Image (tube, helix red, strand yellow):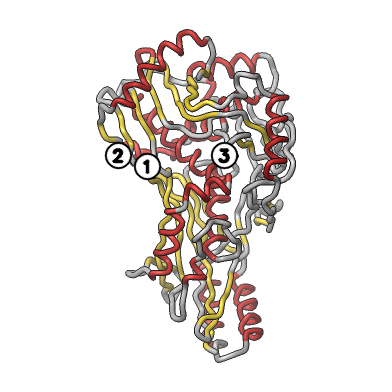
Amino acid sequence: MRFLSSLAGVCLTVALHAMLLSPIAFGQNGGNPGGGNQGGGNQNGGNGGQFPGGILINPSGVVDRSVVLPSGGAALQKKLRQAAAQNLSTELNQKSERRHVSLKRLEEEITKQLKGETLLSPDVRFLAGLTRIDFVFVIDDGQDIVIAGPAEGFAPITNGRVIGVESGRSALNLDDLLVSLRSAAAESAVGCSIDPDPQRLRDSQQWLKQNSSPATLDVARARLERMVALQGNWNITTFGVPEGSRMCLSMIEADYLMKRLAIGVDNPGVRGMKSSLALAGPGDNMMRRWWFAPHYEPVERNPQRTAFRLAGPRFQLFAQEEVMDANGNLTDADFTQKSSEKFARLFNERIDELVQRYPSFADLQNIFDILTAMAIVRDCQSRGVLNWKPAVLLDEDALPVSNYLVAKETTPMLNVKMSGGSLVIGAFSGGVTFKPARVVRQFQESSSEELSHEQKSMTPTLESSGRWWWD
């Protein structure tokens, strides 16, 4: 038997969130088991709690394995609706095709709640139940900006993630908006990456070359375990936003869930979806880097730059073969295997189904939306179109965000299969890369009827609502 080696990445174990167990009521942490802060927006007290999603991080910063199997169905949805009815107003707990949120009025509401020295209300913390941003408007002669999209009642599930009671999509999170507004680096690039230590990668590859003679499957797997031990922990790198923020950890979670699907550790439960490892054959280079990047189609703005429309899947998956030099450094190869390309194509073709099944992917869509919307804010301010400048939203002392345990490392996650008498090993590096300013530059001038209609139909409702959000 020929033992094929190809180790270039890692796949972190994450919890699967198609449906979890029973929901929990909104507490001072919104379902997060960390501490609370009675005086500000930080629902976790800044003391480093567990991320309210699908990855568990130990005190040393190493991601622990945690798999939560999908379950719940109609019974869970019933409990979610009950929780939403108990904690939300009747108006907020309604499904809306188009809900508008004024950032200026949101800030005024937050200021009022902070003066009362109470916790921020659920409607504020989860942006009135928005589950996507489809439009961004500059209104009131440049004195306000509005984000708009579908919305519904919402409630937390047992791991702390807050989802819509009808769609199961993650609700937009105030923390993400604050982090995006405050992170100057978000103007350039935001993302995460996981990579092996070059020296340990080289040592493991050299050992494998010396121990790759024909062997039984049991011997081959023992060699794999030895190689993994030589690898040691892999490094998690983040950039553009605070490493302990919900936004940062959400990107990590989505990335590693994707890699578990790519490597075949988890069954995606989507018809026609196969792992990259399942598609691989003998001799395939399984040194691969997978990463998420933005994909909006189309993106439109009016000539005055006061109305913007976001559409499309929000992100897409890219794949690139890698090669290792003599020092253990990985670089892009000048080719890409068909199996790698096919997995990316299968994933991108089924994004809607995957997002529906896994709220962590919907969370990534929401993060891309928020980063894009806040990049529009900065662009409109720089052009003099938007004159509103937030105050408390930028004040980290008055309005701190939740600060969770930082994910620094993880152990390699590998999977193997037999193909043509050879043992094929799959392991993938990669991450998330998003440059918000580049997306804003891609908006095309348009005078579409839909964009004009949305802008005109919003203003009368704004004047009569008297709230910071309205349908």
Of the pair 133 and 430, the residue shown nearer to us: 133
- SS for tag 3? loop
- What's the amino acid at mark 1? Tyr
Instruction: Judge depth for marks 2 and 1 and give the one in front.
Output: 1
Q: Where is residue 447 in the image (x, y as percent from the top left)?
A: 25, 26
Q: Position of residue 434 (x, y in %)?
A: 42, 46
- What's the amino acid at mark 3? Arg
From the viewer's perspective, tell me whether residue 256 is left or right of residue 51. Answer: left
Residue at (52%, 50%) from the top-left corner? 354
Can residue 414 be seen from the camera position used here?
Answer: yes
Vertical side of 255 occupied by 200: above or below: below
Q: Badge 3, how many Cα within 10 Å: few under 14, some, many 20+? A: many
Vertical side of 127 occupied by 114: above or below: above
Q: Are marks 3 and 2 in contact (CB under 8 Å)?
A: no
Q: Where is residue 268 in the image (x, y as percent from the top left)?
A: 57, 58
Residue at (58%, 57%) from the top-left corner? 269
The residue that disc 1 covers is 296
Q: Earlier in the sequence, mark 2 or mark 1?
A: 1
Q: Badge 2, how many Cα within 10 Å: few under 14, some, many 20+? A: some
The residue that disc 2 covers is 442
- What's the amino acid at mark 2? Gln
Q: In the image, which disc is placed on residue 169?
A: 3
Q: Are marks 2 and 1 in contact (CB under 8 Å)?
A: yes
Of the pair 270 and 212, the residue shown nearer to us: 270
Instruction: Judge depth for marks 1 and 3 and give the one in front.
Output: 3
